[in-house]
Image: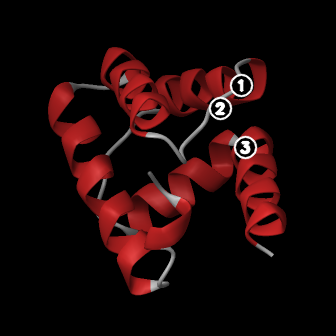
Amino acid sequence: MSFFIKQMITSKLKQLSPQELFKYAKQYGFTITEEEANSIAQYLKSHSVDPFTEKGRNTMLQELAKRTDVATAKKAHKLFKELITSYGLEHLFE
C-alpha cells in the first residue's frame, strides 16, 4: 500500500498546475506571484523529485527558495511536516 501512496503523491507533484499552486498558496496562507507559480510547476514537471527522503525534500526546498524566497521555503517545509503528521504518513518519509 505504501508504494501506491508514494506513486500517487509523486504523480500529483508532477501534475500540479500554476493555478492549483495559487489555490493551495491561498488556502495555506502563502503569497506567490504568477511567475513563481509557473516556475515551481515547471520545475516539478521537468525534474524527478523525491519528497520521501530527507535529501529529496532538501533539494525541493532549495529549489523552492530559489524560485520564491527562503521564508516561503521554510513555511512550506513546516506545512509539509504538519500535513504528514496530520494524515499519519510519517512512516513513508525518511
| Alpha-carbon span between mark 1 and mark 2 | 12 Å
Do tag 1 and tag 2 residues touch (Cβ < 8 Å)? no
Q: Nearer the viewer, mark 1 or mark 2?
A: 1
Question: Residue 91 at x, y = what percent?
Answer: 50, 70
In this rendering, position of residue 5 left or right of residue 64: right
Residue drawn at x 42%, y 28% is: 55
The image quadrant that residue 78 belongs to is bottom left
**10 Å crowding of disc 1: few (<14), some (14-19), many (20+):** few
Three-letter residue code for mark 2: Ala
Q: Which mark is residue 17?
A: 3
Do tag 3 and tag 1 residues touch (Cβ < 8 Å)? no
**10 Å crowding of disc 2: few (<14), some (14-19), many (20+):** many
Residue bearing the label numbered 2 = 41
SS under mark 1: loop
Do tag 2 and tag 3 residues touch (Cβ < 8 Å)? yes
The image quadrant that residue 48 belongs to is top right
